[in-house]
Amino acid sequence: MKIFVDTAKLSEIREAISWGIVDGVTTNPSLVKKAIGEEKEDTKLEDYIAEILKVAGKTRPVSLEVMGLTAEEMVREAEILYEKFNDIANNVVIKVPINTYKGYYEGLKTIKTLSEEGIPVNCTLIMTPEQALLAAKAGARYVSPFAGRIDDYLREEKLNMKKGVDFKKHDYYPWDGKGVDDNGIKSGSDLVEKTVIILENYGYDTEVIASSIRNPRQVREVALIGAHIATIPFSVLEKMLLHPKTKEGIEKFSEDAAESGYERLFS
Ligand code: E4P
């Protein structure tokens, strides 16, 4: 499974790349806002984005999202972003929401136009496999089913659990085999699985990016399912490395190395 890092923070992108595990980067307007708040300093937004593209380099696609609500606006913005930034490292992918409140079909029209122009699209805010199928058919290079937000939705809408009170972002919500089932979707991972199966049934080149990942267990589940890519926040990447027995093991090795004079081997 390819791993994208789901952040606009340069420090996190650099660090994750240094671990040798990053195949791409996804950003959205909320992540850009967060990054600017935390680390932009006095850099112009254009320069900050240019730096993300440089750091990611030629081999790692970077998704940049449009903000318009009509196909006309989104195509225009996508062309501007592509023209302004793609020459830096030839790695820009345009993120387009599957639909907007200005019209259900605007996302599809945008994907069709951009893919005909040769601009790669990551279709975002996918909440059903049917949306993903239409996006793939319209020419999307990637589709991004939002696993975490679907788990939130199932818990809020169907279980009447209060966000941040009855469950927190890092909580895991499993399907109990009977309870919650939203029109055939039982969990965020289930959304990802059904999306992968449908696209593979028909041989689409479109890759499925398991998105809105909140915890390591979701990463494991989407990897087992065969998601082509998971885009993972830096904090979840860190958590994927943690286990109390690993910590205990390294403490014991260090202690025993000190007591046995093992460190003299390295002098
Ligand atoms: C990535 O492409 C998405 O924008 C991101 O994963 C959304 O995550 P969130 O639901 O935690 O905001």
Image: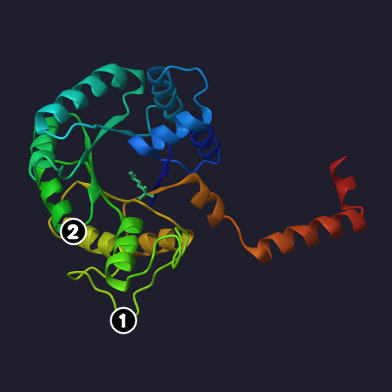
| Residue 115 locus on image (x, y percent) | 13, 33
Mark carried by residue 93: none
Query: Measured along the vertical axis of the image, is residue 258 above or below residue 96?
Result: below
Q: Position of residue 100 (x, y in %)?
A: 16, 42
Spatial CA span between label 1 and label 2: 20 Å
Q: Residue at x 38, y 34 (%)?
A: 60
Looking at the rendered structure, the kind of residue marked 1 is Gly
Please name whichever residue, 48 or 260, is drawn nearer the observer in this view of the structure.
48
Q: In this view, does 215 lie to the left or right of 149?
A: right
Determine which quarter of the picture holds residue 214.
bottom left
Q: Is residue 172 left or right of residue 265?
A: left
Q: Residue under circle 2? A: 129
Classify residue 70 by image quadrant: top left
At 34% across and 51% down in the image, what residue appears? Answer: 211
Up-down relation of residue 267 to residue 255 (above or below):
above
Query: Which residue occupies the foreground of this view, 226 or 158?
Result: 158
Left or right of 83: which side holds 245? Answer: right
